[in-house]
Amino acid sequence: MPWKGTSMKRQKAKRKTRSKQSRPQSGPQTDAATKAPPTKSRRQFLDFAKSWGVVGALAVGGGWYLIDEVTATIAEGDLSKIGNGIPTVVQIHDPSCPRCTELQRQARKAMGDFGSDELQFLVANIKSEKGRALATKHGVGHITLLMLDGGGTRRDALHGVHDSSYLSTVFRSHADRFAKPSS
């Protein structure tokens, strides 16, 4: 069979060069241009920043609240403060009891009217050894507020959940009655 002027090798070479020319060349410039992300509008960016700004502010604010809450809980749990010369209110508390938690919230609210040297509020957790011992010593259960004088002697007990305004009145009476004498 006669060939028309070109050999087989030349025909294959021509086909290869044609196919290379018809394909787009890949390289750093072409890839970057075809894969560039769509540009975001200024409005989309501001919405995104605002959303994450709110999330960040909530996280920071919530963190400060938790730090304050934990610090208060640690300070309130220090039963060694009983008998330090300051009249004391001790809540006998079960952390898994919703009524105890409500009493604690109301008592903390009522304590806002008092200075730290005037009246102190402590929490005896009955799930701890010291808290259980204090409750047993005074013969009381949870959801109870013990009123102790500056020497740690029990003067009164209040059982059940009460409103902060009522507790404030009771606490004021207790603090005034057992205040340290002025020097």
Image (tube, helix red, strand yellow):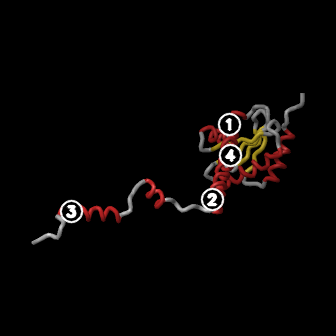
Residue 45 vs residue 68, the one in the foreground = 45
Residue furthest to the left in view is: 1
Q: Position of residue 15 (x, y in %)?
A: 26, 65
Res. 141 in view: no
Q: Gap in Å between the C-alphas at discs 4 and 2?
A: 28 Å
- The residue that label 4 is drawn on is 64
- What amino acid is found at the position of numbered circle 2 in the picture? Phe
Tell me what residue is drawn at x 75 percent, y 46 percent: 157
3 or 4: tag closer to the N-terminus: 3
Image side of residue 14 versus residue 61, left or right:
left
Q: Gap in Å between the C-alphas at discs 2 and 1?
A: 50 Å
- What amino acid is found at the position of numbered circle 3 in the picture? Arg
Q: Gap in Å between the C-alphas at discs 2 and 3?
A: 58 Å
- Establish if 153 lies above or below 23: above
Image quadrant where one finds the C terminus: top right
Residue 91 vs residue 44, the one in the foreground = 44
Label number found at residue 10:
3
Label 4: how many residues lie within 10 Å, few (<14), some (14-19) or many (20+)? few
The secondary element bearing badge 1 is classed as: loop
The secondary element bearing badge 4 is classed as: helix
- The residue that label 2 is drawn on is 45
- The residue that label 1 is drawn on is 78
Asked if marks 2 and 1 touch (Cβ < 8 Å), the reply is: no
Is label 2 or label 1 in front? 2
- Which quadrant of the figure has residue 11? bottom left
Q: Position of residue 89 (x, y in %)?
A: 75, 42
Res. 144 in view: yes
Q: Gap in Å between the C-alphas at discs 1 and 3?
A: 96 Å
Image quadrant where one finds the N terminus: bottom left
Is label 1 or label 3 in front? 3
- What amino acid is found at the position of numbered circle 4 in the picture? Trp
Label 2: how many residues lie within 10 Å, few (<14), some (14-19) or many (20+)? few
